[in-house]
Amino acid sequence: MQKIYSRATMMSSTKMIEKLKQGIHSLDKSVEPKPVDSDDEPLPYVMDYLTPALIEEARTQLNETDEIRPIALEELKKLIKQDKKLVSIMDDNFLLAFLRARKFNVKKAFKLLQNYWQFRKEYRYIYDCSDFDSVKEVILKPVMGALTHRDRKGCLVLVFKVGLWDPEVDVYEQVFRAVTGVLVHSITYPATQVCGYRMIFDLRGLSWKQLKMCTPSNILLMVRSSQYCFPGRYKGFHIISESKLFNIVWTIASPFLTQKLKTRVMFHGTDTSPLLDYIHPSVLPVEFGGQAEPFENTKWKDLVDDSTEMVARHLHYGYQA
């Protein structure tokens, strides 16, 4: 049988799973309420500002004010400097993502930041990759990526067409790098930091070809990286056309999700109409019951090219060996 990991096979599957379990149980957790409603036009993916409504949401939901923000940033920077083994990005916008993810609790934000860089050290074999062209090729395929506009509450909408993924062409590590690239770029926008993400998992076409990649170790790797080591606020997970094959994955993954995230998982079967309650029809691709063009990623080529350098810079930071 084809090996799922290349360098990862140095650690047995059992040991890796146990290590990931320990990492998950030792990391930080938080509970966040839903954002306020907004009747405005759908906001675009690219926006380096906060609207008045989002500023108000940051205040009421995340405890962010003009007075608190600079004080929290200064306290967080002091904690980073005290960690002598850590070389972190110190840009205010980068650090604000962690503060917003933990509602401006500086100690929790610092713990999340430590998790972020520690995870990259532990799985250096995934992240230390200079072959950015192959990563860009994965991103530009119509398999996973972001919609051009946000949902009704300002969340960034990510789509994963799992059935279109060919793991024999794009191995798990490559897809993981591609997902990381999308997340790292998207979290630079203040609107994403405040509103978070809404995710659509389209399982049409799911087969054993993809399922055999969904080993416990691979699933736990994804859960740990996104749930405890990334400053994302996850507002909804929409599962489309789930099947008996998916039930196997869900049985493995669900015990490792927080109760809060479990309540945000929605199973839609073949009825995609409930998505319109969250995403405006002008934004939602036609295959999900909306009016927008079918989901594809070639339109992002220039943006992906421009963001590659920014993502690559992260390789120069983190916990030193």
Image: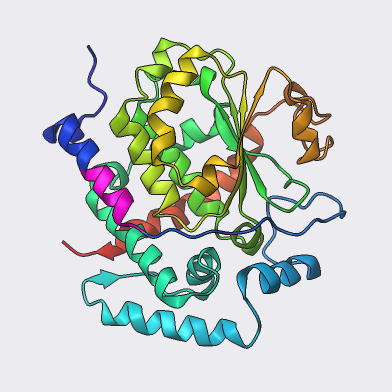
Q: Residue at x 83, y 35 (%)?
A: 281
Give the answer, above or below, for where 57 lies relative to 263.
below
Give left or right: position of 83 versus 177.
Answer: left
Along the line of sight, which residue is nearer the eye, 137 or 275?
Answer: 275
Query: Which of the 4 image quadrants contains residue 249?
Result: top left
Q: Is residue 175 visible?
A: no
Q: Residue at x 42, y 79 (%)?
A: 76
Q: Residue at x 33, y 65 (%)?
A: 114
Q: Quadrant of the N terminus?
A: top left
Numbered label tally:
0
Q: Quadrant of the C terminus?
A: bottom left
Query: Which of the 4 image quadrants contains residue 241?
Result: top right
Give the answer, above or below, for where 243 lies relative to 88.
above
Q: Within the magenta stretch, is there residue 309?
A: no
Q: Within the magenta stretch, is there residue 24?
A: yes
Give left or right: position of 173 versus 138.
Answer: left
Q: Residue at x 74, y 33 (%)?
A: 275
Query: Which of the 4 image quadrants contains residue 116?
Result: bottom left
Measuring from the top left, give residue 26's x and y in whole percent. 29, 56
Q: Is residue 59 visible?
A: yes
Q: For the stretch drawn in magenta, what is the main secondary structure?
A: helix
Magenta-highlighted residues: 19-27
Q: Which scheme is used to colour this image of the protein?
A: rainbow
Measuring from the top left, give residue 44's x and y in whole percent. 74, 51
Measuring from the top left, give residue 268's x and y in whole percent. 67, 25
Measuring from the top left, give residue 210's x and y in whole percent. 42, 18
Along the line of sight, which residue is nearer the eye, 290 or 243?
Answer: 243
Give left or right: position of 169 versus 236.
Answer: left
